[in-house]
Amino acid sequence: MMTDSPRGTDLSLSGLLTAVAAAVPQRLAVVAGERRLTYAELDARATLVARHLLDAGIRPGEHVAVLSFNRAEWLETAFGAWRAGAVPINVNYRYVAGELRYLLDDADAVALVAERSLAATVERIRGDLPLLRHVVLIDDDAPDRPEGVDYEAALAAAARSATPLPATSGDDLYLLYTGGTTGYPKGVMWRQEDIFRVALELRRPGTPRAADAAAVAERAARTTPSRMLVLGPVMHAAGQWNALSMLFRGCTVVLNTDRVFSPIRIVDLADREGVQTVQCVGDAMARPLAQELLRSPGRCQALTTVSSGGTPLTPTARQLWRAWKPGITINDSYGGSETGVCGSATSRAGRGPRRFAMGASVAVLDERLRPIPPGSDQIGRIARTGRIPLGYYNDPVKTAQTFPVDEQGRRWAISGDYGTVAADGSVELLGRGSTVINTGGEKVYPEEVEEVLKAHPDVADAIVVAAPDERLGQRVSAVIALSGDRQPSKAELRAHCRAHLAGFKVPRTIRVVDEVRRTAVGKQDYRWASRVARGEPAPAPSR
């Protein structure tokens, strides 16, 4: 069925935006560089994107890749694709030609909306992508002139279109490509209503879930608007989910549009826009920001909350923020592309694995998919049941592995993380199984060692990986960057670790680099660190 407007009570992401925009049309929705969009403007531009895609022959259910840095057009395109009944595909802007070829082919992308400078790489592999038939180019002042339709010209033409829009539904597909720490990216398929429930619907404890889009809009109208500075890329789950959840609350999303992480510029932006919340991804963003604020304590007076996801904050990072503002709220959430947001961290003294309070649908499972009881010292994999993904796009084998069914017929989403269950039911997060180090039969979770290393006053950042060892099979190896002019000896660093860790967890080799490399979203680049730890030439960054 076709309708001239997607307005309604469905829980599709497009329908939710339209409902909120009708409730708070003149409220500021997005700040992205010099661009500022009200909810009415964001909603209207999403409709123009939808009509352009439909007029270009993109059919409901087909996939539209989005390749750009943080900017308003990313959100316009995503909502426009959903509104057209199509499926937006997030593409990592750091990918080189081979990675882009794999993702666009695996995703069956028929259209691409990209910044000109990034689309130039895709043009070189266009012959390997027979399904890709339509390209829209966002101007980024680059000299590149790949073949495609200009984004603003496309929207201007769509303003004269009367093409009806398809009805939307909470059953519509939400597809999120995730690279993880190793291997090729995988497309995680969600129902839109399910991803809204487990990752995007923010509500106070005890508040019932919204029954429909009208209820979401009513809450947005009652909400006192606040501003969140989103530092994570919106092409990644953490940045995207935080941006969408703020929009569905009727609040303002301030995007960091810089292409290089600069704590000074970010503090300037947060201060100028009067943001109340900063969204970051772990210590890689949180620590330098806190240090910059400590150098200028009078700035960002409106800032009351730090929200982190994707990788946990260390106690050292938390201490830095509280040194700047003792009463600041620190929200450290745990989740993943396959599980949604599962829980939040509880504050505690000391170092070691992060403890998270989990929801009722989350458990730690043993090898037979049985929940491990509270207080057990058994290690298992963190998993979620209930509202979970449909599976991986184009990969039934990995779907069966990651989303198994237990003996009671319950279907689970198994994360890559391991943990234990404390007596109070909270979960101790140990780390990812794909990076665990087996040294002489003892298992070492890198995150635990990294947290201890980063607590040393002279260590700015660290990645811990396995290196080959003839006697032990693998040895614990650390790649670190220092924070100042002082050069602590490796013996001093090992002694620091030994004071907090069992002996087998202490790094046997430590390599010092100028800067620890992380991915575009701030996560550890374990592949790069493994090369460095083995003494091999490290590959150049993708971008």
Image: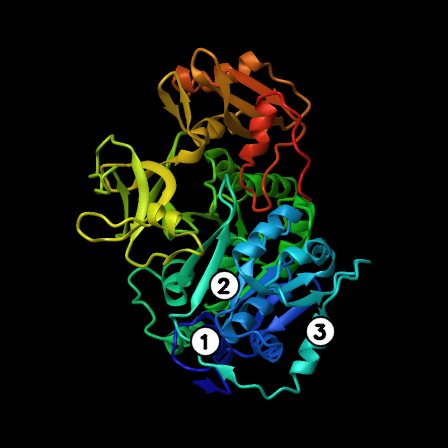
Q: Residues within 10 Å of mark 2 (few under 14, many from 20)?
A: many
Name the residue tied to disc 2: 244
Name the residue tied to disc 3: 152
Percent from the top left, x then y, of residue 210? 34, 71
Residue 288 picture quarter: top right
Q: CA distance from mark 1 to mark 2?
A: 13 Å
Residue 502 numbered tag:
none
Classify mark 3: helix, strand or loop.
helix
Along the polypeptide, which appears first: circle 1 or circle 2?
Answer: 1
Q: Residues within 10 Å of mark 3 (few under 14, many from 20)?
A: some
Tell me if 185 is positioned left or right of 215 in this view. right
Question: Mark 1 against mark 2, which lies toward the viewer?
Answer: 1
Classify mark 2: helix, strand or loop.
helix
Could you tell me the amino acid type at mark 1?
Answer: Gly
Q: Residues within 10 Å of mark 1 (few under 14, many from 20)?
A: many
Name the residue tied to disc 1: 15
As drawn, 460 above or below 374: above
Tell me if 47 is positioned left or right of 202 in this view. right
Q: CA distance from mark 3 to mark 2?
A: 23 Å
As drawn, 267 above or below 540: below
Residue located 57% across and 74% down the image: 58
**Which residue sits furthest left?**
408
Residue 51 appearing in the image: yes
**Nearer to us in this view, 137 or 247:** 137
Residue 227 appearing in the image: no
